[in-house]
Image (tube, rainbow, N blue to C red):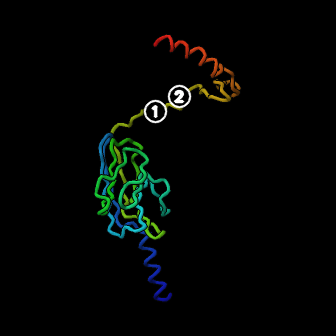
Amino acid sequence: MHPPCLWISIFTLSFLVPSQETHMTASLGDIVNIPCSYNGTKESTFICWIQDCTSELNCNNMIILSNGQKVIFSQSDRYQLLGTIEQGDMSLTINGLISNDAGTFCCRVQSNKSFRDLQKTHLDIKGKPEYDYDVTDRIPERNQIYNNQFLKMSQVNGSPQKAGTFNSICTVIVPLLMRLQ
């Protein structure tokens, strides 16, 4: 291997290895702050946070995105960058933790069309889960709206049985609501 190729290989590998990996534990309902900082140039730089990040270096499935100056996308109001973004503080704040917040979070930077992880943090959530069981497993019948009709799924033969039309239900309900006002 020629020395220039070796340099390029080392340089490329440095973008694939996360600079830090940490572990955090928090409780349901807590506010958590996952630190991340960036000291690079702000030109053509995007920083994203991803939950359940994989080895694929991209910003797919991001929960929040910054252009290095401000937040330009957030999947939810619960996800915020409250630090001084212009100075490289990309720490992720998650408000009101829920059990689905458990997992691995990556602070990922894109610069010059390449990605690298600045921070990788595994978050464990402790506390009683919001639900004791999956309610969808216990529903014997499901309603569907199909071609303006409510259909009731028959468990005997699996074919839909007409339960009433959307228009006929509205014809009854709307006048009743008008009288109540």
Above or below residue 94? Residue 12 is below
Q: Amino acid at mark 2?
A: Arg
Residue found 63% across the figure and 24% down from its top? 150
Residue 95 relative to residue 116: left or right: left
Q: Amino acid at mark 1?
A: Tyr
**Residues at badges 1 and 2 in contact (C-beta under 8 Å)?**
yes
**Label 1 CA crowd tier, 10 Å (few <14, some 14–19, many 20+):** few
Looking at the rendered structure, the secondary structure element under dot 1 is loop
The picture places residue 148, in percent across and down from the top left corner, at 65, 26
Q: Residue 128's quadrant in the figure?
A: top left
Residue found 32% across the figure and 59% down from its top? 85
The picture places residue 65, in percent across and down from the top left corner, at 42, 55
Residue found 46% across the figure and 75% down from its top? 12
State how far apart marks 1 and 2 are (Cα): 9 Å
Residue 65 relative to residue 149: left or right: left
The picture places residue 76, in percent across and down from the top left corner, at 41, 45
Looking at the rendered structure, the secondary structure element under dot 2 is helix
Q: Which residue is mark 1?
A: 133
Q: Which residue is mark 2?
A: 138
